[in-house]
Amino acid sequence: MGSTRISSRLPSAALFLLTLSAPAMADSFLNVGKQQPITVLINASPWYNGFQAVARLYEKQTGNKVNLEVTPFPGMLEKVRNAVRSGGTSPLDLVNINSSNVVEFYAGGFLEPLTDIDPTFKLPKQVLGFVDAGCWDAKKQFRTCASGKLMGYAPNGNVELFYYRKDVFDKMGLKVPKTFDEVIANCKKLQNPPKSYGYIVRGEKGDSISYDMYAFLLAYGAKDVADAANGDFTVTINSPQAKQALDKFLAVEKACGPANAGSLGQGDLIQLIQTGKAMQAQAVVAAFPSFDQPQKSAVVGQVDAAPLPAAKAGGKPGVAIGSWVSAIPKNASEAGKKGAIAFSKWFLTYKAQYAYAKAGGIPVRSDVFESDLKSKPQFRWMQAYLDEMPYGRQMLGYTEGPAVTQILGLRFNQALIGELSAAAALNKAAKDMYALFKKDGRKTGMLPPLAE
Amino acid sequence: MTHVLLRNVEKYYGAVHALSNINIEIANGEFVVLVGPSGCGKSTLLRMIAGLEDISGGDISIAGRRVNDLEPRERDIAMVFQSYALYPHMKVARNLGFSLELKKTPELDAQKAIANAAKILGLDPYLDRFPRALSGGQRQRVAMGRAIVRRPQVFLFDEPLSNLDAQLRVHMRTEVRRLHQELAATSIYVTHDQVEAMTMADRIVVLEAGQIVQTGSPLELYERPANRFVAEFIGSPSINILPGRILDTGRVEIAGESLPGPGPVGAKSGAVDVGVRPEDLHPADDGALFGVVSVVERLGAETYVFMKCADADLCWRVPGTPKINIGETLRLAVNEERLHLFRPEDGARLN
Amino acid sequence: MKAAAALATGGSDYCETSSTRICLAREGADEKNRQYSLWCRACAAGAPSAIWCQLMTSAESPAARRALGSITDLLDRHIGWFTLGPAILLLLLLTVYPIINVVLMAGSSIHFEAGQEVWKFALWSNLRELEHDRIFRVALRNTAIYAVASVLIEMALGLGLAILVSSMRRMKGFMRTLLIVPILLPPVAIGSMWKLMYSFDFGVMNQVVTGLGFQPVNWLGSTSLALISVIIVDVWHWTPFVFLILFAAVEGLPTEVIEAARIDGARTYDIVFKIIIPLLKPAIIVAALFRTILAFKVFDEIFLLTSGGPGNSTEVVSLYLYQVFFEQNQLGYGALLSLAIITATIVFILIGYRVKSATEAS
Amino acid sequence: MLVLRGYSRLIGIFLLTLSAFIIVAPFLWVALQSFKYEIQILQGTWFTEPTLHNYVDVLWSQRSDFLKNVLNSMIVAGVSTICVLVVGTLAAYSLARLRWKRWIAAGFLAWTLVFNMIPPLTLVGPWFLIFREIGLLQSLFALVLTHITLNLPMTVWMMMAYFNELPRDIEEAAMVDGCRRIDAFWRVSLPLVAPGLIAAGVLAFVFSWNEFAVALNLTSRATATVPVAIAQFSQQYEVQNGQMAAASVLSTIPALLLMFFGQKFIIQGLTMGAVK
């Protein structure tokens, strides 16, 4: 969802806020008291407008000021680094960091555990933890809430869903697939390039392909390393399960994808859905609202969502969590920290999350997913989301995460475009990862190479 | 035999009429100088002959061939520029031989031609230098050499000497003239310096404001200037112009004294400008002109005496170094037969 | 000297024809001669610029004149430092620390603990890593291909355009403005827009290709084509840069030299290759130099078009540096990579210069 | 310069028209996209009813500070261009005409070149620190300073090439006639390199106008420049092509205007110096 809806959607959001705030103000919004103004770093993203609407609502409710420092996506990382690394007081009080980069800030000791600022701070139990995304165990150097401290919470819970064209499925009498084989079976009927593509998955080198491949890897029970949580970084990416997963991924791409699958990025993929060429697809939930906007989509109301496919019937879908984390820099001012905590508490209430969802954000409270919203057509993805949540897995909870993503992103892509065989790609990826962990002094090892 | 012919040549820059109705015939081997004050269009005319400017009207032909629509390179001409326009990135030898290189002349012939030109101009020691390492005179010679090497139908010179110091200029003047005699090539030479024009030309074409005022040999121009402008432009020191009257009798009155006059005059009585060359004065006790000497310039071979007379500045040229002092009063007479009469309104010659 | 002497006789004409509107022009005409020397005397009394000069001549008070004079005297005596000084100062202020920082980082491994930077000497291990870095080598090769192809094409096109536009009789200024439109667009917009144009299914490029009856082309998705597609964008983007530099140089060429060549019998071809191009050498070198450096720094366009893929087919050094230094946060090794890139750029430029000189000599 | 006649002139005009078309067409295409809804852009539709929706969104949506961004960019690019022209041209003249010790000249030029080769990624961190230490962070002044520095190498090298093309003797003659060095520079050399000055100015302006990495780091929302704003349309998940096209068109207009008047200003300034 882009900002096209600023003209179309914002008035409705504002209207909604007005109707909601007037009667509800007195009782149900959390009272956080008077706070100093805070500055929140957020990137210009599909969920920005939802966040902004909620921040304005907060200002209105509490009278506390929230400055939104909006930055382009690549600016997010730089701005946080600049704010926390260079000493002195951070100009930012609350920062939003994307999933793969947040570990760097945990490990570097740049963020203040929320409970250190306010010992009473606790995530309401309805708030989705997104598998320990917001916790850090400094000793283990790993994201885990079992032994770690609460560093932050997800401002939005982004996962990938399976999308399909409901109208086409109904017309052709197809069933929503539960496994990748069913996906392929469906797509054989749907594939008619270049008019339509049976199933599209991102194949572009880098984050794109590695993130989308996790759905396959996790579904087939493959892992990147043996047990990162307990310090065992033995590389397992060239396991037979991983081979199965990659083989399946390649089979799907070959049978169902477009000719330029090897360069298909997030934007291209969403474009194919919006223009009605993609019959089935795997994409982030953040993209969903844009399928329903007439200005952006030729298939308004025709795309429906389901949980991702599994490896075999009755199997678990592979759900890689890619949530962002909102956290407070250690070098923020005391007043800023306090203000940020207050805002966070307020933000995580049901009312606020409900408003957030209505304004275009992806809420992080399960009770919002189970509310009346779920039955509204524009939130028809919520059920699939709820169904998927139990299978969610946080990937790469260690500092080498971004480097591993790049390694996998290159090797998978090489397999996809035929430069390497599946086995060779996995063996090479394993070697690269091994070298990486070795250099960092991790306890690591390797599986025997796959037969090429 | 006519070699270069300009017929009714016109030049417009937008609405500005830069040259109008230019007709010149130049014979084979003739050395013609286009002369006039700056802005008179002489350089433009030369560049039109060269093909560097478009011709707005009329025809130019060289050696019987109409060249209006030919590229400069197709006209078989050579040109020496005021700033020499040497190729700064080529050594002297290549500068000299560049046109031959373009014509794909065999290497040996080209070398011979270069050597020959270098010898004529005394450039041998500098063949391996870049133009920037040459003095002004040497550069000028290279520019000449570049023209010579080509053996063109016509040489064009665009004020080639004006960037040289006075001494070198006098020297190069004779040099150019000598070269012309050696090569016997048709040459058109543009200058604003009348001394150059007088000393070098077979024939001079005087231009003023885009029009030809007079064409003729240097002596013709000197002796019978077609109008006051030419009279003043040609000759150094400049001609004296005195206010006078033509009387009914055909006699001419200057400073209140009537003189026999220079012969038939194509005008009725009335005011007239009388031109007197500085050398056409002689001391005479009954002379009409008298005044107080203000400046005396002694050049050795001759002396210029300046005095105020009849509300005009008068210059008298005397051979040798006569004893004349500043402040002295002199009385001079004119050589009646050598008077030039001009109409005051437009300066046209009356006799 | 010479010019001055020349001006004594034919100054105004000299300036007219060499189209130099300089103060010397005044010396030509006798009447104005006096004005000129007056003005030059004003200069001699100490006026560094026209405005000051006018101030000077209108200044009533001799004291003020003397004060101004002594300032400008000072200026003139130390003109070297006054002219080069500001640039040196700026460079000292803003470039020394970053460069030293990069050099120090290149020999270290840096990580963060408890919010503090921890530096460790790691020059040898960084160097070893560089030695075995396959991707960097691939990226370097791609960058070299990219730089050679794009710079050569752009130089040829830019030079051609510069000469063509300068040969126009009117609308030169308009053409110059028109032809530099691509460099006005932000690179991020160029990347996104070309990605849209290259789009396999909907892009305007494939609309044209299929409209002509061919199969759609996989511009960005095929390993053999991706680099070429990216180079096309680069050529479109940066040819105006070369054009602009060379156009200014062509306009500054002495007209008479070219006229002389025309009279000497040079055809258009000869004038271009034997006169204009050799004379433009300084500007050509500067344009090529900075284009090459820019080519080695290319980032936004490729990042948005292909992210370096498919495979490693469009992986270039700056993209790889971005991954290592920025995404993976390997500050030490990343700094070493940037030094390696600088070295590679220098070597590349030197080789290019050698090749150029060699081809010229032969 | 070159005079083309007859056929070659026709060919020249044809080639020029063709290249102008090739160069301008993608820009026109971008402009065309700015009048379409996103879905029409994505589908590659050619003829649609034009909408101003993208422009409205870019200029007046709540998130947008576009007009402010344009103003910031105009200040930064304008001021830094003027400054870099002054500093760079003086330095270039100094190196081209004055007698500097070899190692100083070579050292200076090499340093600028090496600095120009440094990937901007490695520069922004230290600069962030420097400006924070002197309290200029998030100010336009800091950005102007960095842009002057970034564009200095190119300006110096370009202007040196143009100065070196000039014959020395014109300037020497002026000095013999009583002009000081600085007058010879101002009244003789500078007017003669006016085309070069304009080229260098245009390039410095364009590079400053489009500079992203440093601007992103050294500015805040209040001082952000146009490229930073435009980058916001290229998001993590998708590109907002319509808005980006509209913003690109909007950002080229002030740039073109400013460049146009800048050229006039330079030419006027120089002719004033030279003739009056």
Image (cartoon, coloured by chain):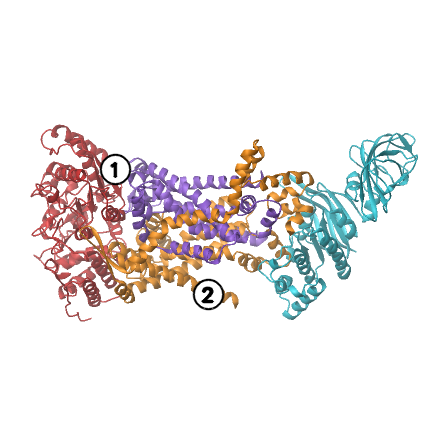
Chain colours: A red, B cyan, C orange, D purple
Residue A442 horizontal/vertical position (percent): 16, 62
Classify 10 Å Cα crowding around label 2: few (below 14), some (14-19), many (20 and above).
few
Q: Label 2 is found on which chain of the structure?
A: C
Q: Amino acid at mark 1?
A: Ile
Q: Please say if the residues under marks 2 and 1 sit with CB atoms less than 8 Å apart.
A: no
Is residue D77 rendered to the left or right of residue A263?
Answer: right
Is residue D243 rendered to the left or right of residue A444?
Answer: right
**Count of picture labels:** 2
Same chain for marks 2 and 1?
Answer: no
Q: Amino acid at mark 2?
A: Arg
Q: CA distance from mark 2 to mark 1?
A: 57 Å
Residue D17 horizontal/vertical position (percent): 49, 49
| Mark 2 element type | helix
Q: Label 1 is found on which chain of the structure?
A: A
Residue C181 horizontal/vertical position (percent): 42, 46
Is residue C62 rendered to the left or right of residue D71?
Answer: right
Residue, disc 2 = C354
